[in-house]
Image (cartoon, rainbow, N blue to C red):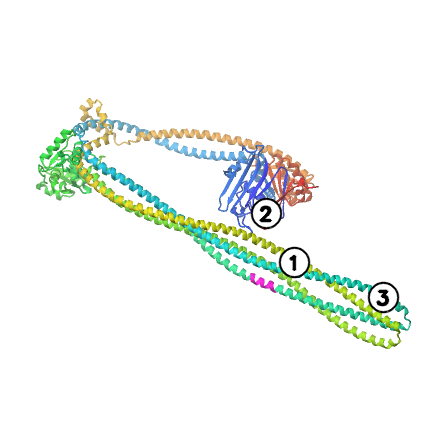
């Protein structure tokens, strides 16, 4: 296995995607400081799972993402991929190449991939475990890593040896086994406590269970006896109940038709409501989409406006550049004309100089001939002439020098004027930049204040929104609870109303009569109803009146005896069972006796039952007949007291339903009876009231939830707005900081230019002053020379008469020679000046060419930017047009939805009116049907109550129990009941659930015992596994230590060319806990610890230790990051030799500045930063270079 390549994008300075193609051998990475070489090492360390930002030379993890530069914007993601060659199957994956990828987003989210499949960091660590390429191995060795190994405690240094020994996997498994063992110990402790508690509970539970089983047997026998006794009482009632179930179908069929129609209308109403709801949702979505489209349109138009402004700015810049281009062209023409003129002047000067030299040669020859002819008499005159010539020559030279100085001074004054003008321009530019800088700093303060306010507002919203979301969730949960209550209550009311409509609990004969009346049969036309449905009872008296009526609640009311006869004949003819008929004309009302009037004033007396209920006047005789002599009392104690005092006794009923018969039995207790007609009617009334209150609460809760949801959505929109504003402000802040930085850089450059220009101006001023001084000196010298020339001329005038024509000719020749020499000197000076002007013109042409190149580059960049902006503007224009069309379509769709919603609402109103009318008709029919069934329910109530009592006490199979032959029990039942009651009293109170509790405790005890055994076996197995792993780890670590020590000593001697080195275990006899100490003795020194060695010796010792580890367990790849910094040239050569020696077994990637290390590389990658803040790669394969 080896590292095939590294792909980096967005990581630190590697903003663009780059890939390093790597192969076996040694790869070198070089580059200047700050170019980003070590960022490659950080990238590899990061992709291997490094979680510490400090180890990556940062403060936060998002520091690894490219943060932007003067030309580049920040990116939002960093990604690094390592490509590993797995052709030797070193990794447990069935792939020839394994790609490990890590991504990190600026939002804080991170991702890991193996071959583009998402995974966990733990999967990558386990994949590279014991390969030597993991984060804890020798895959990456930096100078800091060397110092870390050297400065580490011996126990920490042992971990490097463990990685080489390949026991990291075992140590991880041992740690996991140790954790499981601790968990098992904790579970065992808890189990022991539970088992102890169960043992304490099992004994008493067994005794209680035995008593409970005895009690159950006695109770079963007593229940059987009581069942037999009770069945005798129920025999007649059961015969009557078999014949009273089938007489009410006619009325119900009409009601069923109405219910079908109601269901149909309700279904249509539901469909319309659902359609309305869908319409409302669609309208809401359309509004949201329309709002989003409008916001996008505003954004696109804003971006379009920004692009237009940039295009206008570029157009202005293009005009300025064209004007500048014209100016440079005109300047070019001037320079060319000046160059041509100078060339012509130079050529003319050369021709004049050649002709003058020929004339001078001829004149000198003539002068020599004339001088030969002079006699001795002319000697004095010759000397005078010679003196005169010398003076004239000096005067001419001085005059020429004076002319040159004047020209030079004029040029110097022009230079001074130009430099002063440039200095003034630089000062003006500095003042402008300082003004911009001050304005930018003021704007920076405003933006920072605005940012602070926005961040405060965002923090406030981020704090408030979770609270509002929690409040809304609680409101919605409360609303769901109310809806559930409403559903249950509606269902309960529906069941109760159905039971009332079906006359549930009424006898078969009563129901048949009421059904026949509803069908309009003549035999039952005179039926007024049953007693219970014709009276109204206060809620608190419902139970008492139902008990007082008993079976009479189902008695059928008719007006005359003949109608009663027809009803009886109807039952006989149809075989519908029996019923009790109350002819109102025959009934003799039963009044409360006058002699017992005193009772009504007694404490606890509620009143006579007949006086406590309300009814129609026609029905009143039946009420008085049935309830006129029944007294309702508050509780049983007062009823018993009154029963003893009343003579003759009367029937008493309590509010709880106890009954005291006149000098007879007392009936009471707690039975789970079915609700009677009156009780159901009371429950329906209470349920309707509760339903109305619940609907009101539900509407209020919905309104509050909507209001809170609206507030929450407003808060979210505000948070989005604040976040967008914050991002925009941060962008403005970033741009402003960049501009301020540019202003400061420009000011610094201006300051440098100003300083240089000031120095040049000072030098030019000094030169100008020196020129003035030289000119004055030359003028004084010229005055003196002219005076001397006058003196010599006077002397020559006295001798002129003695000179012959030869003298005159000689004088003429001399004068001509003097003129020609003077002219020769003037031409030489003029040539020098022309050469200086040619050089100056060359510099001006070079400056012009540079300005022209800069202008062309700027115009090219402006044209490119203009084209990009034009394309962007066309895209934005198309997007604007599309958004406008989309908005129009959305508005049309919303209008269609509004129209559809209005139509649905109108249909819903029409259906509601029809449904209301139908329900009104159904209510009338249901009321009539209920009235009919009430006449039958009275008789069935008593019988049903008895049956419910039997089912409550003996279960639903009590009839099957009676069918078994038990004649001996039937005969002895009264006596057996008494005996059994005595035995149960002697047994006392027992816990019926004791056997079940005991059985549960016993099963729980057995389960816990089995769990304890399993845990003890598991603990023993884990301890054995840990012991075996420790033996294996110690054996491998000791073998590795021996091998590493041997190689370390040999490599130390090779690197130091002598000396000794060893590895020693310290601190513990257990090798897995001992420390590792490095002892080194360089040549000529005593053995000593690392701390006493020099920096170079430490580094070389660490290198020997690293290579010894690699020799024992070669790593797939190893990265050395400037580990040779502390080595001298000789040691660098030794280090490079080791690299080449180990390169056949380990792939090396070396980052270095040292030539010796670079020379050992097969491939060199150069890291450059041609663009500020952005690193780039350049590669060279050394074996391909010419020797």
Badge 2: residue crowd in 10 Å (few <14, some 14–19, many ≥20): many
Residue at horizontal 23 percent and vertical 37 percent from the top:
257
Residue 710 vertical placement versus 552 (above, below): below
Residue 599: quarter of image: top left
Q: Position of residue 927 (x, y in %)?
A: 19, 40
Q: Position of residue 239 (x, y in %)?
A: 17, 28
Residue annotated with mark 3: 364
- Find the distance from the CA under tag 2 to the CA under tag 1: 32 Å
**Residue position marked by numbered label 1 in the rendering:** 847
Mark 1 or 3: in front is 3
Question: In this orientation, does residue 675 appear?
Answer: no
Q: Earlier in the sequence, mark 2 or mark 1?
A: 1
Q: Quadrant of the N terminus?
A: top right
Q: Write down the residue under mark 2.
A: 1175
Cα separation between marks 2 and 3: 76 Å
Residue 871 appears in the picture as rendered: yes
Q: Is residue 82 above or below residue 1023?
A: below
Do the residues bearing badges 2 and 3 touch, measured as CB atoms within 8 Å?
no
Residue 751 as seen in the image, left or right of residue 493: right
- Callout 2: helix, strand or loop? strand
- Could you say which is closer to the camera, residue 981 or residue 936? 936
The boundaries of the magenta stretch are 424-433
Q: Which of the two residues, 362 or 1015, is positioned nearer the viewer here? A: 362
Residue 146 at x, y percent in the picture:
61, 42
Q: Quadrant of residue 547?
A: top left
Q: How many callouts does the rendering have?
A: 3
Residue 883 in the figure: left or right of residue 93: left
10 Å crowding of disc 3: few (<14), some (14-19), many (20+): some
């Amino acid at each position: 296995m080896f590292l095939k390549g590294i792909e980096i994008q967005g990581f630190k300075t590697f903003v663009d995607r780059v890939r390093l193609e790597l192969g076996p051998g040694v790869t070198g990475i070089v580059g200047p400081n700050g170019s980003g070489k070590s960022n490659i090492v950080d990238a590899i360390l990061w992709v291997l799972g490094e979680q510490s930002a400090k180890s990556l030379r940062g403060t936060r993890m998002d520091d690894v993402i490219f943060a932007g530069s003067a030309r580049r914007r920040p990116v939002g993601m960093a990604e690094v991929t390592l490509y590993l060659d797995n052709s030797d199957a070193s990794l447990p994956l069935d792939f020839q190449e394994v790609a490990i990828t890590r991504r990190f987003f600026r939002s804080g989210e991170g991702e890991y991939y193996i071959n583009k499949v998402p995974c966990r960091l733990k999967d990558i660590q386990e994949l590279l475990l014991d390969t030597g390429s993991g984060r804890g191995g020798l895959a990456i060795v930096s100078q800091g890593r060397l110092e870390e190994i050297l400065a580490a405690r011996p126990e920490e240094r042992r971990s490097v040896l463990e990685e080489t020994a390949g026991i990291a996997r075992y140590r991880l498994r041992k740690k996991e086994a140790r954790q499981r063992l601790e968990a098992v110990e904790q579970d065992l402790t808890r189990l022991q406590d539970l088992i102890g508690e169960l043992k304490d509970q099992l004994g008493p539970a067994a005794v209680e269970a035995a008593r409970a089983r005895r009690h159950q047997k006695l109770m079963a026998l007593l229940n059987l006896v009581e069942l037999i006794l009770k069945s005798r009482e129920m025999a007649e009632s059961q015969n009557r109940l078999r014949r009273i179930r089938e007489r009410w179908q006619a009325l119900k069929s009409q009601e069923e038709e109405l219910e079908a129609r109601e269901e149909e209308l309700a279904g249509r109403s539901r469909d319309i409501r659902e359609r309305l709801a869908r319409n409302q949702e669609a309208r809401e979505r359309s509004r949201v989409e329309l709002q989003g489209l409008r916001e996008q349109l505003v954004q696109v138009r804003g971006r379009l406006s920004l692009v237009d402004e940039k295009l206008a700015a570029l157009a202005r810049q293009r005009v300025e550049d064209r004007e500048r281009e014209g100016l440079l062209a005109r300047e070019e023409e001037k320079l060319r004309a000046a160059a041509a003129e100078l060339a012509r002047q130079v050529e003319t000067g050369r021709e004049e100089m050649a002709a003058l030299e020929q004339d001078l040669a001829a004149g000198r020859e003539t002068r020599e001939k004339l001088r030969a002819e002079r006699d001795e008499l002319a000697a004095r005159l010759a000397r005078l002439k010679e003196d005169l010539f010398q003076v004239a020559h000096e005067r001419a030279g001085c005059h020429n020098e004076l002319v040159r100085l004047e020209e030079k001074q004029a040029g110097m004054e022009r230079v001074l004027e130009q430099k002063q003008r440039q200095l003034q321009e630089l000062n003006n530019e500095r003042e402008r930049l300082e003004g911009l800088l001050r304005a930018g700093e003021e704007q920076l303060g405003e933006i920072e204040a605005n940012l602070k306010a926005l961040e405060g507002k965002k923090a406030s919203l981020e704090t408030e929104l979770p609270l509002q979301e929690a409040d809304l969730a609680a409101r919605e949960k409360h609303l769901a609870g109310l809806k559930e209550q409403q559903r249950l209550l509606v269902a309960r009311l529906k069941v109760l109303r159905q039971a009332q409509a079906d006359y549930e609990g009424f006898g078969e004969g009563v129901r048949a009569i009421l059904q026949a009346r509803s069908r309009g049969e003549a035999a039952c036309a005179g039926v007024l109803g049953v007693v219970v449905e014709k009276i109204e009872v206060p809620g608190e008296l419902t139970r008492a009146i139902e008990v007082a009526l008993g079976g009479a609640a189902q008695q059928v009311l008719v007006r005359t005896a003949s109608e009663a006869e027809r009803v009886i004949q109807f039952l006989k003819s149809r075989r519908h069972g029996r019923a009790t008929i109350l002819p109102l004309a025959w009934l003799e009302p039963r009044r409360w006796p006058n002699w017992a009037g005193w009772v009504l004033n007694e404490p606890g007396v509620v009143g006579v039952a007949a006086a406590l209920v309300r009814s129609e006047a026609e029905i009143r005789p039946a009420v008085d007949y049935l309830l006129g002599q029944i007294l309702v009392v508050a509780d049983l104690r007062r009823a018993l007291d009154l029963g003893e005092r009343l003579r003759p006794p009367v029937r008493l009923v309590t509010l709880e339903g106890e009954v005291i018969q006149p000098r007879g039995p007392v009936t009471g207790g707690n039975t789970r009876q079915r609700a009677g007609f009156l009780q159901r009617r009371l429950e329906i009334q209470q349920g309707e009231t509760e339903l109305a209150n619940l609907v009101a609460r539900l509407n209020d809760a919905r309104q509050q939830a909507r209001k809170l949801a609206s507030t929450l959505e407003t808060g979210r929109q505000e948070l989005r707005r604040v976040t967008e504003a914050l991002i925009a402000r941060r962008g403005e802040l970033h741009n402003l900081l960049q501009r301020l930085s540019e202003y400061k850089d420009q000011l610094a450059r201006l300051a440098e230019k100003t300083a240089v220009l000031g120095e040049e101006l000072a030098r030019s001023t000094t030169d100008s002053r020196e020129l003035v001084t030289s000119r004055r000196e030359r003028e004084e010298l010229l005055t003196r020379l002219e005076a001397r020339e006058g003196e010599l001329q006077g002397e020559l005038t006295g001798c002129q008469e003695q000179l012959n024509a030869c003298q005159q000719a000689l004088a003429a020749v001399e004068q001509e020679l003097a003129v020609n020499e003077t002219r020769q000197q003037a031409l030489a000076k003029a040539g020098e000046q022309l050469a200086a002007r040619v050089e100056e013109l060359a510099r001006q042409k070079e400056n012009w060419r540079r300005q022209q190149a800069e202008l062309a580059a700027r115009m090219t960049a402006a044209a490119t930017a203009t084209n990009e902006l034009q394309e962007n503007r066309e895209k934005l224009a198309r997007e604007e047009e599309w958004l406008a069309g989309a908005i129009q379509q959305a508005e049309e769709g919303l209008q269609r939805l509004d129209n559809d919603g209005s139509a649905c609402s109108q249909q819903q109103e029409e259906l509601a009116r029809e449904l209301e009318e139908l329900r009104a008709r159904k209510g009338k029919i249901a009321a009539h049907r209920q009235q009919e069934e009430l006449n039958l329910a009275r008789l069935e109530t008593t019988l049903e109550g008895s049956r419910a009592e039997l089912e409550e006490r003996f279960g639903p199979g009590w009839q099957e129990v009676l069918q078994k032959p038990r004649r001996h029990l039937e005969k002895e039942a009264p006596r057996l009941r008494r005996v059994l009651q005595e035995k149960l009293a002697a047994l006392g109170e027992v816990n019926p659930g004791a056997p079940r509790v005991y059985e549960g405790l016993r099963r729980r005890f057995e389960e816990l015992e089995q769990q304890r055994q399993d845990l003890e076996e598991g603990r023993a197995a884990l301890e054995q596994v840990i012991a075996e792993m420790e033996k294996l780890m110690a054996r491998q670590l000791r073998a590795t230590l021996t091998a590493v020590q041997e190689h370390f000593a040999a490599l130390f001697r090779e690197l130091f060319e002598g000396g000794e080195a060893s590895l020693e275990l310290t601190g513990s006899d257990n090798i897995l806990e001992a420390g590792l100490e490095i002892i080194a003795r360089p040549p000529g020194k005593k053995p000593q610890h690392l701390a006493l060695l020099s920096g170079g010796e430490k580094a070389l010792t660490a290198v020997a230790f690293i290579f010894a580890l690699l020799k024992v367990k070669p790593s797939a790849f190893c990265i050395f990051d400037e580990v040779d910094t502390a080595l001298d040239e000789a040691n660098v050569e030794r280090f490079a030799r080791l690299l080449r020696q180990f390169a056949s077994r380990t792939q090396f990637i070396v980052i270095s500045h040292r030539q010796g290390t670079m020379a050992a590389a097969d491939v060199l990658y150069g890291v450059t930063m041609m663009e500020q803040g952005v690193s780039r790669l350049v590669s060279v394969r050394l074996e391909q270079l010419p020797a």
